[in-house]
Image (cartoon, rainbow, N blue to C red):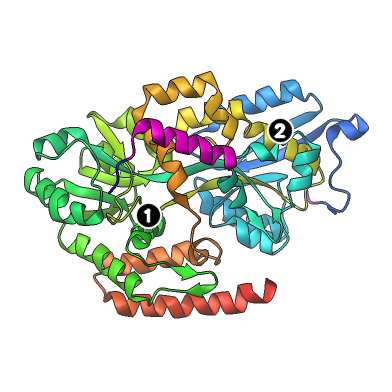
Amino acid sequence: MKKLKFVSLLAAASMALTACAGMGGGSNSGASASDDGGKVTIDFWTNHPGGSKDIENQIIKDFEAQNPNIEVKLTDAGSNYEEVQQKLNAALAGGQVPDLAVVSDVTWFNFALNKQLAPLDELLDKNDGNKADYVQSLYDEYGYDGSHYAVPYGRSTQLFYYNKDMFKAAGLPDRAPYTWDEWNNDFAPKLKASVDSKVTPMSVPSGANYLDWYFQSILWSMGGSYSKDWTMNMTAPETIKAGQYLQDQFKNGYMKSTADAASTFSAGLAATMLESTGSLGTVKDAAKFNVGTGFLPGTGEGEPKVATGGCGVAVLEKSEHKDAAAKFAAFLTNAENTVTFTQATGYMPVRTSALDLPAEKSFIQKNPNFETAVKQLPLTTKQDNGRVFVPGGGQTIGAALDKITTGGEDVTSVFTDLNSTMQDTIDSQIKPKL
């Protein structure tokens, strides 16, 4: 696989980045605090991605100092994106709806499709949003039917993490494998032979913990996909082949799934892991060994295709204070705050101008693992509809992956059933609304 030099990759990243509530009637709902001089309170529901509660509180304090007519209430809405979604669904069915909320890559679309999120483009224009400064590929992932329904916030890519000490002991080079064949034929066998029997060569999240997100990139590298537009593609030969590869990794003892891959890796119980850039901060603090990161392995025919993930912030259609909510969403994700947020958590900078700030330039120079994530950003690819746009799609795929990995069930049979189930959902729940 072609190895790109640091300078050229950063240049490519820079080019890509540059290119790139109370229940209410909602009809007038754009009135901001400054329109009538009164003070309003907006409710922000979040799961504090990357353990960011203290950062969110500080950003809120700064925002309120600059906008004395707007008070922001920070609401713990769950420990993960799914819990936020469940709470939001309950509120929309008859509870107290927030003004803005965290929505993940797999939860926002269904809310937008059902007209529960406010279109943001005009709101951002009215409230100092500077939407052109968002990394275009990240902002566009929230696009539907000519509008955008969230701003990127805790956005991440997948990285290959490795224990440098274990690699050295196994006689491996200080880098990630370039291809999945190299991993399977060289790296994994050497690691398995050299590490303690309690240590697995690679830790990956289980199907209930986003294995479907990580497997998507393996799948792409082998020519498969979950879907093509609104047609499921789980029975394609390339998809079946990738599923068989994943199953064989478990059978051969090269991979093991866990609810928390980062904790397993940080504890020295795995030589490598596939994890989000959002775990960089956690791993750095917890690991007692030298940690390395690299691009995901590809196929040897070019650079890997990598999925982005994570969350954005959306304004609810029922909010009575859409302008105030949009103003806060823009402030939460402005260049200075995205630098503070990303440096503390490991998530990606979501503003193109953030990379030009001295604090971010210095941080990248001093943190080569974060630098890996920045260099890999131009290689990211929009996710398959079958995972991110089908209600419960990611969880459904994840459950199927658990069947073929820890369950050892036949890949073709499981993927065929999955293809039929998800296509039925698309045809009955999504297509009529498109």
Badge 2 crowding class, 10 Å Cα cut-off, few under 14, some 14 to 19, many 20 or more, is some
Task: From this view, report whether residue 253 is shown above or below residue 420.
Answer: above
Q: Nearer the viewer, mark 1 or mark 2?
A: 1
Question: Real-space Cα distance between discs 1 and 2?
Answer: 35 Å
Based on the picture, tell me whether residue 106 belongs to the magenta stretch: no
Residue identifier under label 2: 72
Q: Viewer-proximal residue, 108 or 366? A: 366
For image coordinates 52% across by 50% down, the residue present is 81
Image quadrant where residue 31 sits: top right
Residues shaded magenta: 4-23
Image quadrant where residue 54 sits: top right
What secondary structure is marked by label 2?
strand
- The secondary structure making up most of the magenta span is helix
Residue identifier under label 1: 214
Among all residues in the image, which is located at the extreme left? Answer: 193
Task: From this view, report whether residue 84 is shown above or below residue 367.
Answer: below
Which of marks 2 and 1 precedes in the sequence? Answer: 2
Q: Type of residue at label 2?
A: Val
Q: Type of residue at label 1?
A: Tyr
